[in-house]
Image: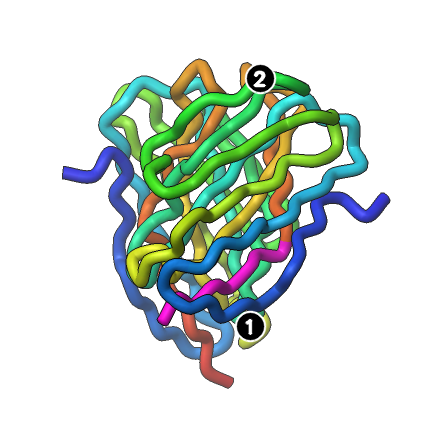
């Protein structure tokens, strides 16, 4: 199993551009998450999904959108990129949101907006 | 005040030393996670625990639910242990983790 994969690994965007960060998992996990990690800060939840067709906002959703058309894929869309969105983005998945289930993380996407 | 606090923020040790990283949290939780983030950026899960103590090789994690405190210990530290260690708690119904800021550990040979 590949686990959780993310593309691209690195990206530089100009202010106002748009892009989609891809996330795929092959573990048949129901729950998927997008986090961002800013220097010196803990990871913050952007959006999450509890299954195909169901998404909800996390702590820092502004400026982002998500969709979940399949169990495997959970893309994160940035519209009108801003310097404040410069960060490292991690996708994660778990079998369930309850109890004793490990979260598996992708390798991250380092995004710079200039 | 952050819901998950870690100490110290930075830690430098000599190879072979015993290391302790602390985590305090202020919310009700169903599980606490210790994660390791290597310089390349990838995050891996080390432990999940909701009570007592767990051991894996040279790593030991303990949790005191009443005091809302957990510790991660590394015995006989090695330069390859150099990484950022992150404490996270799972408390919400969404299943998302609430993260501490991490402890950057550097083990010198």
Query: Which one is nearer the viewer's eye here, A15 or B45?
Result: A15
In percent of width and height, residue B87 lies at 40, 43
Label 2 to label 1, Cα distance in Å?
44 Å
Q: Chain of mark 2?
A: A
Would you identify the image quadrant in which residue A52 lies? top right
Task: Decide: few, some or many residues near mark 2? Use Cα within 10 Å; few <14, some 14-19, many ≥20.
Answer: few
Residue A111 inside the magenta-drawn segment? yes
In percent of width and height, residue A4 lies at 70, 45
Residue B75, above or below A50:
below
Q: Secondary structure at mark 2?
A: strand
**Farthest residue in the left direction?**
B1
Q: Quadrant of the N terminus of chain A?
A: top right
Q: Is residue A5 left or right of residue B25?
A: right
**Residue for point 78% across, 33% down:** A27
* Residue B78, disc: 1
**Farthest residue in the right direction?**
A1
Q: Is residue B95 left or right of residue A106?
A: left
**Residue for point 64% across, 40% down:** A104
Marks 2, 1 in one chain: no
Q: Secondary structure at mark 1?
A: loop
**Residue for point 39% across, 29% down:** A58
Residue A8, above or below B1:
below
In percent of width and height, residue B69 lies at 30, 33
Residue B21 inside the magenta-drawn segment? no
Report the predominant secondary structure element of the magenta stretch. Answer: strand
Pair 2/1: label in front: 2
* Residue B67, disc: none
Query: Which one is nearer the viewer's eye here, B20 or B88?
Result: B88
Residue A17, above or below B17:
above
In percent of width and height, residue B100 lies at 33, 45
Q: Chain of mark 1?
A: B
**Residue range highlighted in magenta:** A107-114
């Amino acid at each position: 199993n590949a686990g959780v994969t993310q593309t691209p690994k690195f990206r530089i965007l100009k202010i106002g551009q748009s892009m989609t960060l891809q996330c795929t998992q092959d573990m048949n996990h129901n729950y998927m998450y997008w986090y961002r990690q800013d220097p010196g800060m803990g990871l913050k939840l952007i959006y999450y999904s509890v299954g195909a067709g169901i998404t909800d906002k996390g702590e820092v959703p502004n400026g982002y959108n998500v969709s979940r058309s399949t169990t495997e894929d959970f893309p994160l869309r940035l519209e009108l990129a801003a310097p404040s969105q410069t960060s490292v983005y991690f996708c994660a998945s778990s079998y369930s949101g309850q109890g004793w289930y490990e979260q598996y993380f992708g390798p991250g996407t380092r995004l710079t907006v200039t | 005040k952050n819901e998950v606090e870690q100490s110290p923020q930075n830690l430098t040790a000599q190879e072979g030393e015993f290391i302790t990283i602390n985590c305090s949290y202020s919310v009700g939780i169903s599980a606490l996670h210790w994660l390791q983030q290597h310089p390349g950026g990838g995050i891996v899960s080390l432990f999940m625990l909701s009570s007592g103590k767990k051991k894996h090789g040279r790593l030991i994690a303990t949790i005191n639910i009443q005091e809302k405190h957990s510790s991660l210990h590394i015995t006989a530290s090695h330069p390859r242990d150099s990484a950022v260690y992150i404490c996270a708690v799972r408390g919400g119904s969404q299943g998302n983790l609430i993260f501490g800021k991490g402890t950057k550990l550097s083990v010198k040979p």
